[in-house]
Image: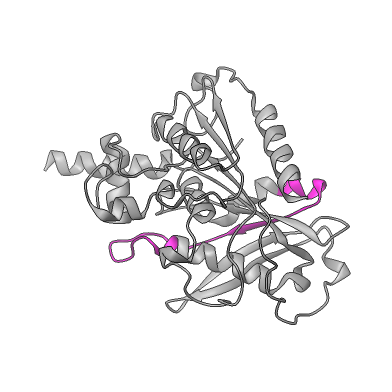
């Protein structure tokens, strides 16, 4: 009985621990977007909250959109939240709204969370549908459909890495707007898992088991299927990989594996290992990190500008 209580405590800890708040290749033209209303000038500097982007298994999935004050059509930065694939929501995406000042439309998405009945790959199916929705409604939201990037931390970091590498062959292109591409042109992944076939600590492995149905490191085909590294090809978008060297939740080796395999495939990949940082990229016990949070933010902005403008 004590061991069962211990496992429950560990799992609840992981849900909290995996909530890290973060500090293009040329593709064929996308199909013409679905006819939609002209962008309303009153939306400059405003936001649209709880927009239904797709309905999956009868469940409306929502996104929030934060608009720059002027300009456009804008490049897009999609934020995918963390939470062990079981918790939290898109509300934390408001923290990235400062990117509006640099001309980015910021979009934060919800996705179906894992439960005792619902497992992966529903999360990535939803995120792919969100990308297609944005392209189909590019005129309505005054966005550039050929300049879409994705950023996520922890569980969100895993999902955006998967979004960047997995194409139609993975079988996750389901739902609405299938005439549109769900490929992105840049990926920023923070503190995320990239290779589930590698053994990791027991606590994280249990969170993986709940969401994916197998333990990380097991010879279960589901672990390879869930791994972004499985799908890497030379036409993947540029990656910026950020990870703390003191991350006690997701080992920094996961970032190194992803960077090595992307580079080997000829994909542009930049690895930033934050010295003294934990899973949330903040300094352990309040100590300063190298690079600092401000420098990390500057690196992210430069990466997005380079690849999406």
Residue at (76% x, 64% y) in the render: 143
Quadrant of the image occupied by residue 178: bottom right
In the displayed image of the protein, which residue is found farthest to the top? Answer: 287
Residue 91 image-quadrant placement: bottom right
In the rendered image, is residue 42 in sight? Answer: yes
Residue 101: horizontal and vertical position, in percent? 82, 47
On whether residue 98 falls in the magenta region, the answer is yes
Is 30 drawn above or below residue 281 in the view shown?
below
x then y, percent, for residue 266: 55, 41
Residue 188 on image: x %, y %? 59, 43
Q: Is residue 237 above or below residue 201?
A: below
Is 292 positioned to the left or the right of 56 in the image?
right
Which residue is rendered at x = 39% and y = 34% of the image?
249
> Which region of the structure is painted magenta?
97-123
Res. 62 visible in picture: no
Number of labels in the image equals 0
Q: Position of residue 104 (x, y in %)?
A: 76, 52
Indicate whether residue 64 is drawn in magenta: no
């Amino acid at each position: 009985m004590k061991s069962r209580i211990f496992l429950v405590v560990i799992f609840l800890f992981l849900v909290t621990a995996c909530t890290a708040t973060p500090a293009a290749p040329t593709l064929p033209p996308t199909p013409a977007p679905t006819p939609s209303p002209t962008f309303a000038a009153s939306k400059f500097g405003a936001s649209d909250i709880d927009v239904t982007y797709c309905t999956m298994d009868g469940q409306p999935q929502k996104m929030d959109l934060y608009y720059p004050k002027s300009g456009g059509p804008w490049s897009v930065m999609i934020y995918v939240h963390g939470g062990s694939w079981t918790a939290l929501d898109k509300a934390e995406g408001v923290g990235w709204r400062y990117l509006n000042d640099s001309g980015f439309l910021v979009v934060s998405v919800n996705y179906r969370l894992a439960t005792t009945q619902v497992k992966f790959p529903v999360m990535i199916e939803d995120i792919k549908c969100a990308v297609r929705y944005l392209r189909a409604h590019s005129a309505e939201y005054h966005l550039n459909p050929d300049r879409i990037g994705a950023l996520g931390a922890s569980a969100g970091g895993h999902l955006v890495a998967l979004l960047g590498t997995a194409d139609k062959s993975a079988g996750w292109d389901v739902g609405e707007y299938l005439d549109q591409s769900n490929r992105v042109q840049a990926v920023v992944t923070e503190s995320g898992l990239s290779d589930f076939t590698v053994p990791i600590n027991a606590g994280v492995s249990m969170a993986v088991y709940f969401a994916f149905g197998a333990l990380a490191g097991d010879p279960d085909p589901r672990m390879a299927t869930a791994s972004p590294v499985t799908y890497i090809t030379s036409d993947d978008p540029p990656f910026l990989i950020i990870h703390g060297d003191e991350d006690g939740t997701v080992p920094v080796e996961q970032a190194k594996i992803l960077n090595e395999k992307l580079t080997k495939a000829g994909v542009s990949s930049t690895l930033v290992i934050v010295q003294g940082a934990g899973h949330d990229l903040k300094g352990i016990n309040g100590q300063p990190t190298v690079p600092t949070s401000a420098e990390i933010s500057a690196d992210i902005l430069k990466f997005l500008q380079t690849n999406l403008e």
